[in-house]
Image: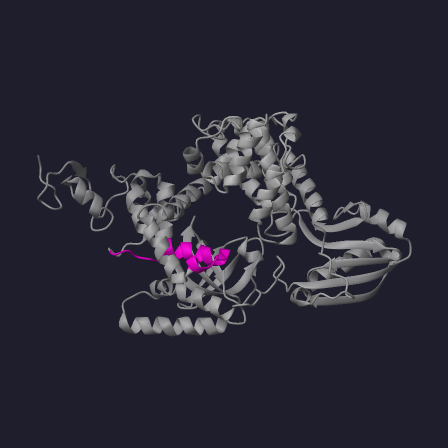
Amino acid sequence: MARCAFCEARKGKRSCPALGGMICASCCGENRLRTIDCPPDCPWLGGLSAIADRSAADMKIPDEAWDSAQDLLFSSLGRGRGRWFLDAAERVFGLREHDPENWERSTVISYAALVARDAEGKRHVDRVFDANARDLDPAQAATLESFRRSWPSLFEVKAIDRGVGLDLLDIFTGEVHSVSEVSLATQVSRGDILLAWLGRRDGEMQLTSAVCLLPPDFADQIVEEIIDKVAELRHDRPDTDAHQLVAELSWVTIARIKQLTAGRRPELRTTDGDQMLWCEARFEVSDPVRVRDELARCPDIDHDDEDFVWLEPDGGAGFGEMPRILGAIAIQDDELVLTTQSHPRLDRGRAMLEERLGSLISHWSTTAEPIEDLLDRPAADEEPPVDDLISDDVKRDTIGRMLRRHYTAWLDDTLPALDGRTPREAARDPESREQVDRMLDDIQELAAGMPGGETLDVTWMRDQLGLLDDLHAPDLTYDPEDAPDPDDWLALDEAERTRLVELAHASTPDVLDEPGSPKAHAVIHVVVENQIASGNPPIARATLDRLMAEGASRHAGVHAVGSVLAEMMHGIMKSNVPFDADKYTCLLEQLNADDWIAQPDE
């Protein structure tokens, strides 16, 4: 057999079109695309063909390929070798000493995946790429390569195009990059300084990882410090790229932000980027009945009994079709009060009301006060508490109704993402069922962050689309009457457990939460099963065993424990108090099986 054309020592076992001869597997694996100029059509490249083909650098990467490769990269941080990187980053940032905020954790994860190097000088992203890229499809491999080539820097926001993206000035190179990023464009203002990772996707610049907004009051100070530290490092390592040095110093940026802003509240802004204020415009009303009638007919105003909510039904630039609350309108006797969270919204709302109501109202005062001042105002018996801009009940009911109405119609809307088909049509196609299922996951995640979002029944939508059978693999099932194996149950992630519970309840009514909240019911159900499987706290399993011994079914017993848990969680969220383990134990001990025996196995 011919010798390897590269090392000339081992036997060549595969044909190498780049070397014009045979090559051993070791030399092929270690040197392809590095010291060997592999052609894109080499049969041994697999997914790496996208990297070898320079013309494919700007190849179109579908969302599903991007998401799956990203999940592969970041989810592996918690397993095996990847754990070293996360541990190192946590030590650097001191995250074991406190509960990190979201902006901290996202930057830690980026640092761990894209910056930290092990004893062999390799980053986590490099190891994931080396281990997996050949077996991935080209789009997934191209995604990992985009992460490998992405770079962090401090960027100044130079221009914003709402709903499209923004222009970022790289402070270290002076280059301006037009970045396609709809969400961030709604949250920043010109002149803001960001610590961010930038990379290419689909021929465009995009943010590939964490974004950290430097506090405006300290941005200049932090930038100067990082510039000085980069200069110091460059003196010792003149050949090192500035972006690599910035990456290594990303932990310094986070540490300084935490140090400088300790005890300070973040600056509050609206989704339009305006300073958040408590703004009120007051009007005299000549005919309250006619005013209410006119407001009820206004397409941009929703109402429920005495409350009126001013909405932007299509969400505005950057928000797609989701509704956005702009303000609240209250009518008391002969006075109308418009409340908003910024001056621009107040001006816009006043103009809208005056055009709609004409001579029925007459403006007589406008006031504005920073939200921070209201939060800092000491409580006093003689001073009435400041109400929320819009009550939680009104938010929940209004947005919940609009979400349910929107996504019921969505099932039969033609969507560009589905090549002009409706979700119902696409779900009947075996090749696109998975895409529709992922879209439902995204809808559920989006709704979960909105008041009333828990009333959106995604399980019902899956049932309508015939996707319930796809929720889990055949060997993963859940029967509330049959205790799951503790090890198997705890080995699942929370999303898998919740899906199994949702599937088990798909055709039955809920009893732990009001009708229309299957997600909330499933979450409570999962938490109870978690406590039983883990034995923590022991009272949960002991209570279930007691209720079953007294005649309740296992399913009813889980519901009984869940009813106590749901009550306590409601109190925690409403009053912002910590979980009281002693109270939980006391309430569980008071449960009576007779109250649950008569209940059907919902």
Residue 590 x/y as whole percent: 63, 38
Residue 381 x/y as whole percent: 76, 65
Closer to the camera in the image, 362 or 115: 115
Please check the rendered image and state whether residue 334 is part of the magenta-colored stretch, yes or no.
no
Residue 166 x/y as whole percent: 52, 59
Please check the rendered image and state whether residue 116 is part of the magenta-colored stretch, yes or no.
yes
Closer to the camera in the image, 356 or 196: 196
Q: Residue at x 45, y 71 (%)?
A: 223
Q: Which quadrant is the N terminus positioned in?
A: top left
Q: Is residue 111 left or right of residue 316?
A: left
Q: Residue at x 89, y 57 (%)?
A: 334
Q: Residue at x 41, y 63 (%)?
A: 153
Q: Residue at x 44, y 60 (%)?
A: 97
Q: Is residue 181 left or right of residue 38?
A: right
Per the picture, the main secondary structure of the magenta-coloured stretch is helix
Work out whether residue 422 can be spotted: no
Whether 33 is drawn above or below 195: the answer is above
Which residues are the magenta region?
Answer: 95-119
Say which quarter of the image contains residue 49: top left
Whether 483 is drawn above or below 133: the answer is above
Q: Is residue 598 left or right of residue 218?
A: right
Q: Which quadrant is the C terminus positioned in?
A: top right
